[in-house]
Image (spheres, rainbow, N blue to C red):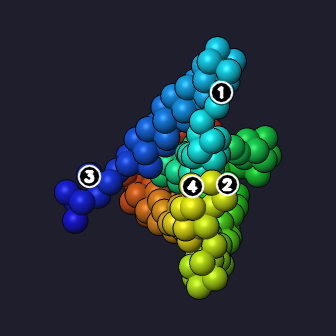
């Protein structure tokens, strides 16, 4: 299990980085084609848009892994260390619940788009494949947040800057 966990430890950010490079290359090629050569590649914008959306979802999952999402830190100073633990527990539990609801709704969306045969307009990629990023990444976020909290409770996570006053 440790080997599998280590292998997949940072794959979200690696995939997001690859998608960022792909997005940059595609848009650069499109700029050269359009403004220098006077033509354009029809499918580039569609693939770039899909890459951008997927990059955002995988980046969010990667940020969840290390608790790097935006926080309102002033509340931590007001309620103190004990309050922070309880508020964090409640907020993270609600977030995991929300993530799981989105996974369920995402699966319904994927199934529906496959059932109706939805495809993209230019490349004709099945929309079910494109929409699959939603349940996959929200499932990853739920898993990563749960895993982070278990490691934090076990003392396996270094305290963040905002935890330093404990």
- Of tags 1 and 2, the one toward the viewer is 1
Residue at horizontal 60%, vertical 50%?
A: 50
Residue at horizontal 59%, vertical 85%?
A: 115
Label 2 SS: helix
Pick whichever, 88 or 34, lies toward us: 34
Pick whichever, 17 or 127, lies toward us: 127
Picture quadrant of residue 112 = bottom right
Picture coordinates of residue 5, whole percent (x, y): 29, 58
Q: Earlier in the sequence, mark 1 or mark 2?
A: 1
Q: CA distance from mark 4 to mark 3?
A: 32 Å
Q: Is residue 136 left or right of residue 87?
A: left
Q: Earlier in the sequence, mark 4 or mark 1?
A: 1
Within 10 angstroms of label 2, few (less than 14), some, or many (20 or more) residues?
some
Residue at horizontal 49%, vertical 35%?
A: 22
Which residue lies most toward the top here? 36
Q: Earlier in the sequence, mark 2 or mark 4?
A: 2
- The residue indicated by pointer 4 is 123
Where does the C terminus fall, quadrant-wise?
top right
- Of tags 2 and 4, the one toward the viewer is 4
Q: CA distance from mark 1 to mark 2?
A: 57 Å
- Of tags 4 and 3, the one toward the viewer is 4
- The residue indicated by pointer 1 is 39
Q: Earlier in the sequence, mark 2 or mark 3?
A: 3
Label 4 SS: loop
- The residue indicated by pointer 3 is 7
Label 3 SS: helix
Give above or below for 67 relative to 141: above
- The residue indicated by pointer 2 is 84
């Amino acid at each position: 299990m440790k080997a599998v966990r280590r292998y997949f430890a940072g794959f979200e950010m690696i995939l997001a980085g690859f998608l960022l490079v792909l997005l940059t290359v595609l848009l650069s090629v499109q700029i050269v084609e359009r403004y220098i050569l006077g033509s354009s590649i029809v499918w580039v914008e569609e693939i770039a848009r899909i890459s951008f959306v997927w990059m955002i979802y995988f980046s969010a999952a990667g940020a969840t892994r290390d608790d790097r999402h935006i926080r309102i830190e002033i509340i931590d100073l007001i309620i103190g260390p004990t309050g922070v633990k309880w508020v964090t527990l409640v907020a993270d539990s609600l977030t995991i619940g929300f993530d799981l609801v989105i996974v369920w709704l995402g699966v319904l969306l994927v199934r529906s788009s496959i059932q109706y045969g939805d495809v993209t307009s230019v490349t004709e990629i099945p929309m079910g494949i494109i929409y699959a990023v939603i349940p996959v990444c929200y499932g990853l976020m739920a898993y990563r947040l749960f895993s982070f909290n278990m490691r934090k409770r076990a003392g396996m996570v270094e305290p963040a800057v905002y935890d330093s006053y404990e």
